[in-house]
Image (tube, rainbow, N blue to C red):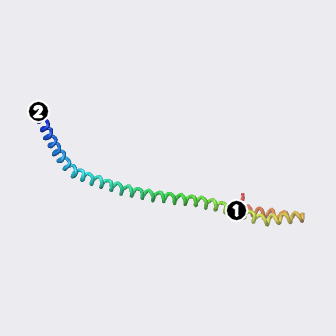
């Protein structure tokens, strides 16, 4: 009889456990569905936020790359302009001195005093015109 009571008690216990687990499982799908929906909503919000952040990052990266390319082009343009300005200055000085050098070589060929005064005067006029002090 003890065995029957024990077996019967066990059957009653398992039946009560089954009904308890059924009631727990009945409550669980509703609450888990609500929590799943909540988690899904949070995940979608985070995914949308991540997409916005990634698009902003891509935009900023494109801006940075554009600015870097502009700076490289600016440096090359400044260097090229500097070379052109230097070459123009050299050409200006040479153009200013060529007539004086021609006159000096003619004066040396004639060996006249008057011929040496003219190149000296021309070179003194060239210096202020070319900013050579």
Could you tell me if residue 94 is visible in this image? yes
Q: Quadrant of residue 114?
A: bottom right
Q: Nearer the viewer, residue 105 or 75?
A: 75
Residue behind mark 2:
2
Q: Position of residue 1 (x, y in %)?
A: 9, 33
Left or right: where 87 falls relative to 71: right
Q: Could you tell me which residue is drawn at 30 percent across and 54 percent down?
A: 40
Q: Could you tell me which residue is drawn at 15 percent across and 38 percent down?
A: 10
Mark 1–mark 2 distance (CA, rounded to whole Å)? 118 Å
Q: Position of residue 73 (x, y in %)?
A: 58, 61
Left or right: where 80 falls relative to 118: left
Which residue is at the far top? 2
Q: Nearer the viewer, residue 1 or 133?
A: 1
Considering only vertical position in the picture, is 108 above or below 30?
below
Quarter of the image for the C terminus: give it.
bottom right
Query: Mark 2 falls on what kind of element?
Result: helix
Q: Point out which mark residue 133 bears.
A: none
Q: Nearer the viewer, residue 123 or 81?
A: 81
Q: Quadrant of residue 84?
A: bottom right
Q: Could you tell me which residue is drawn at 80 percent across and 62 percent down?
A: 120
Q: Quadrant of residue 121?
A: bottom right
Residue behind mark 1:
87
């Amino acid at each position: 009889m003890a065995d029957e009571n024990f077996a019967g008690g066990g059957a009653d216990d398992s039946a009560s456990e089954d009904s308890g687990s059924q009631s727990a499982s009945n409550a669980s799908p509703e609450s888990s569905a609500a929590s799943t929906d909540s988690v899904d909503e949070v995940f979608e919000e985070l995914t949308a936020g991540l997409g916005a952040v990634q698009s902003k990052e891509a935009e900023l990266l494109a801006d940075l790359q554009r600015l870097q390319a502009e700076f490289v082009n600016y440096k090359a343009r400044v260097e090229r302009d500097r070379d052109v300005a230097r070459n123009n200055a050299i050409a200006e000085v040479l153009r200013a001195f060529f007539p004086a050098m021609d006159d000096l070589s003619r004066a040396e060929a004639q060996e006249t005093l008057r011929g040496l005064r003219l190149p000296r005067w021309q070179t003194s006029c060239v210096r202020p015109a070319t900013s050579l002090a």
